[in-house]
Image (tube, grey):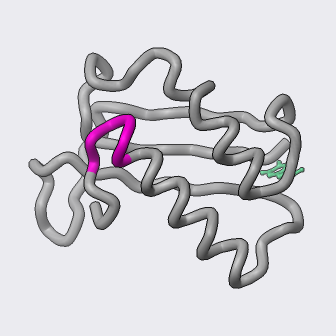
Amino acid sequence: MPIFKLFTNLPKSQIPTDFVNKILPVLSRTVKKPAHLFICMVSSDCSLSFGGNSTDPSAVATLESIGNFGVEENRLIAKEVTEFIEKELGIPRDK
Ligand SMILES: O=C(O)c1cc2cc(O)c(O)cc2[nH]1
């Protein structure tokens, strides 16, 4: 089971309830594993400091998967996931 975990200082009220499912096609396509295998979780309201700033909306994520994680895959996954998070949650991709 590949596992995606997102931690953010956004309040729960600003996380669409379907976010954990909407991100599955992005993960499935980039990690090259079927969507039904993924565990995806979001932890909101985190106390999170990004470069000393704990007030701007920001997030950190981890993705665990066995295989399919070369240098190029890694770049693609990071790009697509950060773009998706920016679009869905309004967190800039560099935050
Ligand atoms: O990609 C998998 O199949 C996968 C990733 C992953 C990570 C993890 O922490 C587990 O305990 C199992 C596992 N399977």
Residue projecting furthest to the bottom: 71
Q: Position of residue 22 (x, y in %)?
A: 58, 28
Q: Position of residue 11 (x, y in %)?
A: 25, 27
Identify the residue at image location x=43%, y=54%: 83
Identify the residue at image location x=77%, y=80%: 70
Q: 94 above or below 72?
A: above
Identify the residue at image location x=54%, y=65%: 78
Q: Is residue 5 left or right of residue 67?
A: left
Range shown magenta:
86-91
Q: Is residue 49 left or right of residue 79?
A: left
Q: Where's the N terminus, which quadrant?
A: top right
Q: Position of residue 62 (x, y in %)?
A: 57, 56
Q: Quadrant of residue 94?
A: bottom left
Identify the residue at image location x=62%, y=25%: 21
Specify whether residue 46 is painted magenta.
no
Specify whether residue 88 is painted magenta.
yes
Q: In this orientation, which residue lies closer to the viewer: 45 or 56?
A: 56
Q: Where's the C terminus, which quadrant?
A: bottom left
Q: Position of residue 53 (x, y in %)?
A: 12, 61
Q: In this orientation, which residue lies closer to the viewer: 70 or 8?
A: 70
Q: Is residue 45 left or right of residue 84?
A: left
